[in-house]
Image: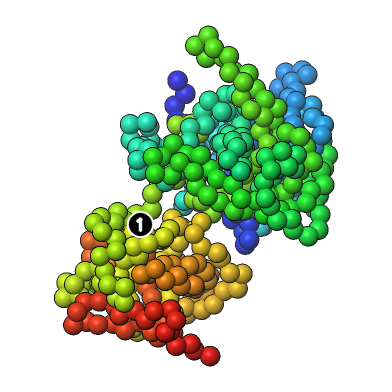
Amino acid sequence: MMEKKKINVSLFRVVNDIAPFVLVDYLDDNADEHTGAMLLDSASQSNILLSENKSLISYSYGALNDKTKINGIGRESVVADNVKINFTLGDAIFQETFCIAELDLPKSVGNYPLIGLLGNHFLTEHHLVIDYSDFTLHTSVINQETLSVSECEFYFPIGGMVAAYGVPVVPMNLNGQQVAAMADTGSTNNMIAFKTVEEKNVSFKMMEGEDEMNGIGGCVHVKEAVVPFSLISMTSDHDCEKKIDSFKLSPSSHFISARKVTADNETVLLPPVDAILGSPFMARQGWILDFSLGVIYKKKSRFLIDVTGNESDEDEDSIDFYTDTAMSGMPYIMVKEGEFKGMILMLDTGSSVNVLFGSAFNELRDRFELERDTTNLIGLDGIPSEVRKARTSMTFNGNSYEMTFLINENGDAAKQLQEDLGFPVAGTIGTPFMSEHGWMIDFANQRVIVQPQENQRRIA
C-alpha cells in the first residue's frame, strides 16, 4: 500500500475567484526552479498539462504511443500525449503522468502561470481532501469510525460513483424526481441539460442573454436560469435540502451517459448525469470532498447549538437572555426559529453595526448573500480594516428581520469568546438595528422587549 504523502496547504485564491487552485514548484529545461498554479478538477480523471504553457516546465515522454482519450463539455473527445512531470506540492514531491491538451483557461492565476490541472485519480491515489469549509487541500485524517453521519448536515458517499462514472456524483431532486449531478470543482458554473429541465416539468426563471462555455473539443452555447432543486443526503434530519441557484442550460442531452454496474451478481442501471454543481456552489455550502474516504459531507455548524425544550415558551413581546449577565457580563440571545435556530448573538450597545465573526460566516455562508462592496470596520485597537458585508433574514418571536452584517475576519474573536463563556457566539447585534426595530434591553428581567412589527418606528 502506498504511503500517504502528508499535505496541508491553503487553496490559492485571487479576488472573485473561488476555483480551487494550488501552488506548486517545478523545474524548467534549464533546471531553474519556478512556482506555478494548478487547478484541482474533480471532474477530470486525468492530470492535464496546458499545451500553451508546456514550454515553461520540464517534462519527459513515456512509452511510444502513450496516449489518453479525454472528454470535456465540447462535443468531441481528444486523444492526448502523456508525459511525466516532477513537482512539489507543500512539502511533498510528486512524479505524475499528465496529458497535454489545449483548454480554454487563463494562462495565469494571479501572478503565477497556470501549468495545468490535477484530476480525481491524483486526489484519490494520494488520499486528499478538498475542504471548502476552510479552503485547504489536505491529507485525509478520518475514517468511517471517526466521521459520524449524525454529526453532518450533508453526507453522501461518492466512492462507488467515482468507480462507475469516473467522477464524483451526488443525487438531486428536480420537481420530486431524482437526477444525477456531477460535483465539478473545476467548473465555475452550475450546469443542467435543458432537456432534463423540460422533461421534469421544472418551474424556472430564465435570465437574459446567452453565453459560451469552452472545453476540450469545442464549445457550447448556453442560457442561464434560476432553478429550484433539493439535494439528497444520508443524514436523518436533512433528507432533502431545498436550494435555489443559477444554472447554465446546456443543449447536451447528458453530460455522462447511463452506466451499468454489477455487484453481488446483480446488474444495476445508473442514470445519466444531467447536471453539474460547480465550485462556487460547493464553496457556499462549505462542502468537504474526501477522496480517500469516498464521501462528500458538511459538518453541522458549531454555531448552531441544539435547542431543547419548548421553543415557544417565551412571551411574544420579549426574548430572554441566553445566560444571566451576572455571569456572562454582556447580554446574549439565541435564535430559536428558522435556519439560524441555535445561533447565539451578543447585544452590543456600544457598536454601530452588526458583526458576524469570520469563522461563523465560513460555516454558514450558504445562508448569507454577500454584497459586492466592502466597508471599513474599526477594531478595539482603533485601526480600521476593510471587511465584507453579508445580508440575510433572521426570525425572532415570529417576526422576520432583514439584517446586514460586517464580517470580522481579523483574529478569532469567536474562539476566545467560547473559551471564556463556554458556548459559541456567532456575532453581535448593534444599537442601530435595535433602535430601528424598537428593541429595549431589560436588564432587571434579563430579557429584550420586542416591539411587534406593525408598531416599529422607522428611521428615515
> Which of the image's four quarters has the N terminus?
top left
The residue lying furthest to the left in this view is 326
Q: Label 1 belongs to which residue?
A: 304
Residue lying at 24% horizontally and 82% vertically, measured from the top left: 442
Q: Nearer the viewer, residue 301 or 244?
A: 244
Q: Nearer the viewer, residue 27 or 167?
A: 167
Vertical side of 10 occupied by 235: above or below: above
Count of marks placed on residues: 1
User: What colouring style does the render use?
Assistant: rainbow
Vertical side of 46 occupied by 208: above or below: below
The residue lying furthest to the bottom in this view is 460
- Residue 35, percent across and down? 62, 48
Residue lying at 62% horizontally and 62% vertically, measured from the top left: 15
Residue lying at 82% horizontally and 34% vertically, measured from the top left: 75
Image-quadrant location for residue 258: top right
Q: Amino acid at mark 1?
A: Leu
Crowding at dot 1, Cα within 10 Å, few <14 / some 14-19 / many 20+, comes out as many
Q: Nearer the viewer, residue 380 or 373?
A: 373
In the picture, measured across the screen, residue 323 lies left or right of residue 165, that is left
